Image (spheres, rainbow, N blue to C red):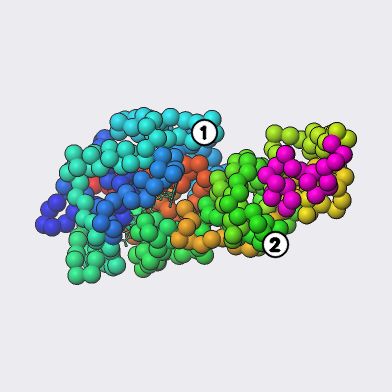
Amino acid sequence: MSHGVYKTAIVGGGASGIITAIELTRGENALNGEEVVILEGLPRIGKKLIATGNGQGNLTNANLSTQNYYGDKGFLHAFFASNPDLEQYFYSLGIPLTCDEEGRKYPLSKQASAVLDILMARLIFCKVNIFTEYKIDKIKLNNGIFEISSGSKKVRAERVVLACGGKAGSNFGTDGSSYSLATNFGHGLTELFPSLVQLKCEREKIKGLKGLKESVVLSSIVNGERLKTAKGEILFTDYGVSGNAVFYISPSVVNKNNAILNVEFLPEYTIAELETMLQDKKENAPFIENGDLLCGLLNKRIGKAVLDTCSDFSPKSVAYALKNFKLSVLGTLGFDVAQVTRGGIKTDKINPLSMHSKNEKSLYIVGEMLDVDGDCGGYNLTFAFLSGIKAANSIKASF
Ligand SMILES: Cc1cc2nc3c(=O)[nH]c(=O)nc-3n(C[C@H](O)[C@H](O)[C@H](O)COP(=O)(O)OP(=O)(O)OC[C@H]3O[C@@H](n4cnc5c(N)ncnc54)[C@H](O)[C@@H]3O)c2cc1C
């Protein structure tokens, strides 16, 4: 640091901010860690990172495609055109990854906290400054130097990286109050929605199912078009539905009106197989009353809810109902419980290769703060890490 001015200040010590700092201090043109500062509002950095993937840290995905992201398609295509392989990147940091059958990549130990431990050790080893309880409320540019304030505390830096996250998960330090740091530099902000989130549904059809879980195939349908389908678990709740299948399909409905969920029960059987099974059941066990037709196939309470939607008790109608249990989506459970924010700082004024602001070339914006969000499966951390790496490489080359 010369004359009290850091070379780079990173506002936000989450996934993208931490990786930006690490990448700044490695490889060609590496900065000295003492010239870099992370400014974090919470008492510690990486709080959200250790909660990711149910504590296992789903860091990235083997199947990366712009199809898994929501935002400006032109920006996304340019952004994803060329990137380092994150599995090798983490390996080079001492974090080998493992991949499950769905392409989700985790640290071999399946411990997100271990990832943070290693990243922290790297930051300390490189002597990167970490100022916690430093919630930045103002950034001013004065003669080419940024003055970054947290109340009366001030830091000065030649480059600033905004890595403040979005509005989802306020107990992780992200309540949406930091977008103004970017909008003050002329960046636009889109409408915001919670994503990767539990869904509120019409309650009549699922009354009495609270607490029940089933393995299903779940699809989202909007205006007759099937948008997304996921195989996984659905959990019925008093407000609607949760479970990993719901998280997977939620990005396709969070900003849509008139969305419908289609639940297919007993996914290992086709509709024709179920029809035959029900026909046989009726013939083999004629003493079973129509209202108990699904008893022994499906949880009894769920079975009754499905039968309530049938026009009649014929095997054909019941088999159809098992594959077409429809629920209208009424909304989401909100930002506080959502994992990700749909929307953010508009990407029209961000260079997708370097993450620098086209309004102010020494200012960089990375991670979830931007109008980019991904599907469930490691896509959001991937964007946070890759955008941090791009920003750091651009900053290193700029000195
Ligand atoms: C429970 C949960 C589980 C998740 N699991 C996964 C998963 O397994 N895989 C996946 O890909 N994604 C997952 N996500 C999403 C993923 O964690 C985020 O998309 C990602 O962390 C975004 O990284 P970021 O650096 O942009 O922001 P964040 O990680 O949110 O970090 C932003 C940081 O900035 C700080 N900050 C904000 N404003 C200021 C300010 N003004 N001054 C100083 N500091 C500030 C915050 O305190 C926070 O530490 C999960 C999210 C949650 C909530």
Q: Secondary structure at mark 1?
A: loop
Judge whether residue 218 is colored magenta: no
Q: Quadrant of residue 274?
A: top right
Q: Amino acid at mark 2?
A: Glu
Q: Amino acid at mark 1?
A: Gly
Q: Looking at mark 1, is its residue's CB closer than 8 Å to ligand 1?
A: no
Q: Residue 204 shows which numbered tag? A: 2
Q: Where does residue 320 sit, x and y in percent of width and height?
A: 80, 45
Q: Quadrant of residue 135?
A: bottom left
Q: Is residue 1 left or right of residue 299?
A: left
Residue position for label 1 = 103
Q: Where does residue 96 sit, x and y in percent of width and height?
A: 36, 29
Q: Secondary structure at mark 2?
A: helix
Q: Is residue 353 left or right of residue 21?
A: right
User: Measuring 73% from the left and 53% from the top, which residue is drawn there?
Assistant: 305
User: Measuring 32% from the left and 38% from the top, which residue is drawn there?
Assistant: 114
Q: Where does residue 54 sit, x and y in percent of width and height?
A: 44, 44
